[in-house]
Amino acid sequence: MGMIERRGLTQDTLFVFIVDNGWTPGRQRMKKNPREFEHTHESKYSPFEDGLRTPILLRWDGHTRAATHEQLVGSVDLLPTVLDAIGRPAAAAAFAGRSLWPAAPGGAALEERPVFGEIYPGDASSLGHPSRDLAYCWVRAGRLQLIVPHARDGKPAWGGYLQEAALWDVVADPGEKSNLAGKPEHAADLKRLRRLLDAWWTPGDDSRVPKPRVTAKPSLWKPPARAPRVFPGHPGKAPELGNERGFDGAIPDGDLIKPALQSLSELHHT
């Protein structure tokens, strides 16, 4: 960002900041690997607010206005937002999510909408069949969050966070300690959020999930055995992103990149 500012390109650049899991830092390290953190209530893979909630920041000088928006949004909204920002809102019609751009310049407030998500323990075991690996799915609407665990092969949901559906008021109870699912006064809330979640996706029915369509085996291109070109000035130094002169690290020549791009193009059009 500093490099863009120094070059005077902030009015030609849309900055987007987001992280891929919760914003709360872990505190409990793994015993077997102290460099990593245990899967806890606040860690990534957790279905709770600590493991899910992240900031989304937008900046485009001359277009955006600094403000805090309390409405619920998700990372699925980023692609429609960018397309809207560059003047192509119609192109976002085929994608999930909504554009956040109308609120970015300080205009109309965003409409209140629920957000949805799911938790998986790791890599997919079968592409196009997410139900097979699902651990938890959730919906947040207003101040309420519903989390539904999904057992697999007769075993409890991965991580053991929950054994049954849980309803939380994350405003009054940010630590998610008081489960409201069994309270009669919240029976209507539980039913409403469950209906929203099932309408979004009913696990077990993957008929609407896109399946991989590979019609050709990609060629395994390997670069020629030659040393990469190192820009003068910093021989042997690791690449420094955002240097005033560009990238000073090892960068392969253009003739090494073209075959790879050609292979990708051929696969895309096959």
Image (tube, helix red, strand yellow):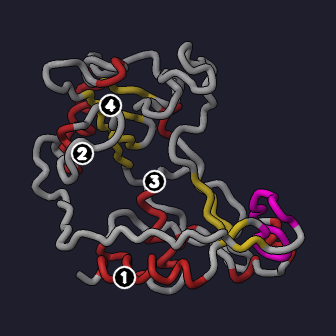
State the separation of the CA atoms marked 4 and 2.
12 Å
Residue 71 image position (x, y, % from top left): 51, 52
State the separation of the CA atoms marked 3 and 2.
16 Å
Q: Is residue 239 left or right of residue 188?
A: right
The reply to whether dot 4 and dot 1 touch (C-beta < 8 Å) is no
Question: Magenta: predominant secondary structure element?
Answer: loop
Q: Which residue is mark 2?
A: 196
Report the residue at 40% width, 31% height from top: 47
Q: Which residue is mark 3?
A: 74
Residue 194 image position (x, y, % from top left): 22, 37
Q: Which residue is mark 1?
A: 265
Q: Which residue is mark 4?
A: 147
From this view, report whether residue 102 is shown above or below residue 147.
below
For the residue carrying disc 4, how many other residues have a C-alpha within 10 Å: few (<14), some (14-19), or many (20+)? many
For the residue carrying disc 2, how many other residues have a C-alpha within 10 Å: few (<14), some (14-19), or many (20+)? some
State the separation of the CA atoms marked 4 and 1.
41 Å
The nearer-to-camera label among 4 and 1 is: 1
Q: Is residue 5 left or right of residue 172?
A: right
Of residues 3 and 170, the one drawn nearer to the viewer in this rendering: 3
State the separation of the CA atoms marked 3 and 4.
17 Å
Q: Which label's residue is closer to the chain start, 1 or 2?
A: 2
The reply to whether dot 1 and dot 3 touch (C-beta < 8 Å) is no
Q: Which label's residue is closer to the chain start, 3 or 4?
A: 3
Q: Label 3 sits on what residue type?
A: Gly
Residue 67 image position (x, y, % from top left): 68, 59
Quadrant in which residue 7 is drawn: bottom right
For the residue carrying disc 3, how many other residues have a C-alpha within 10 Å: few (<14), some (14-19), or many (20+)? some
The nearer-to-camera label among 1 and 2 is: 1
Q: Label 2 sits on what residue type?
A: Leu
